[in-house]
Amino acid sequence: MAECVLSELDDSNPTSLDVDPDTYEDSAPMRRLSSHPTLGGGRVWQDFAAHACDRQIRLHTGWMEEATRDAFLTKFNQQGKVWKWADHMGNAYKVVFRVFTWEKIRGYAAYDAEMTFEVVDVLT
């Protein structure tokens, strides 16, 4: 089983999820397009296609140990940083860490956590 790992672009400083995500959304990017009405009832369409940077990865894990949460939080708090995200399905991306939320699991030194990454580029 492959793991989900957030690391530097050169694979140094890796942080892995403790378990595979409960939910993992890696949806195709939305197209960049718009339409504008013209005089006489016509319409002009502008279509700039879909790009990797229009894509997001969202995941939820029901078990994240405290040390793992702290390591992800350290990465989340670094401003303007681009990371490498390798998922449990063999994909790899350059990402910006956009959202990180967690809630303590009562009675454990563990958390229920959600993360969102903005894709900068698809590596594999």
Image (tube, rainbow, N blue to C red):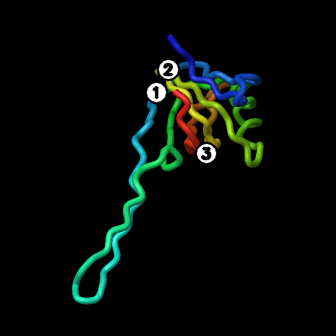
Q: Spot the residue most to the top.
A: 1
Do residues under tags 2 and 1 come within 8 Å of each other at their CB atoms? no
Q: Tell me the mark number nearer the camera, choosing from 2 and 3.
A: 2
Type of amino acid under label 3: Val
Dot 1 or dot 3: first in sequence order is 1
Find numbered disc 2 in the image and state the secondary structure of the residue it sits on: loop
Residue 121 location in percent, x, y? Answer: 56, 39
Do residues under tags 1 and 3 come within 8 Å of each other at their CB atoms? no
Type of amino acid under label 1: Asp
Q: Which residue is mark 2?
A: 90
Mark 2 surroundings: few (<14), some (14-19) or many (≥20) residues within 10 A:
few
Residue 99 numbered tag: 3
Q: Residue at x 31, y 74 (%)?
A: 44
Find numbered disc 3 in the image and state the secondary structure of the residue it sits on: strand
Residue 80 numbered tag: none
Q: Quadrant of residue 5?
A: top right
Q: Tell me the mark number nearer the camera, choosing from 2 and 1.
A: 2
102 vs 14, nearest the viewer: 14
Mark 3 surroundings: few (<14), some (14-19) or many (≥20) residues within 10 A:
few
Q: Residue at x 30, y 83 (%)?
A: 38
Dot 2 or dot 3: first in sequence order is 2
Residue 22 numbered tag: 1
Q: CA distance from mark 1 to mark 3?
A: 17 Å
Q: Is 50 situated left or right of 77 in this image? A: left
Type of amino acid under label 2: Gly
Q: Residue at x 75, y 23 (%)?
A: 12
Callout count: 3
16 vs 110, nearest the viewer: 16
Q: Tell me the mark number nearer the camera, choosing from 1 and 3.
A: 3
92 vs 116, nearest the viewer: 92
Dot 2 or dot 1: first in sequence order is 1
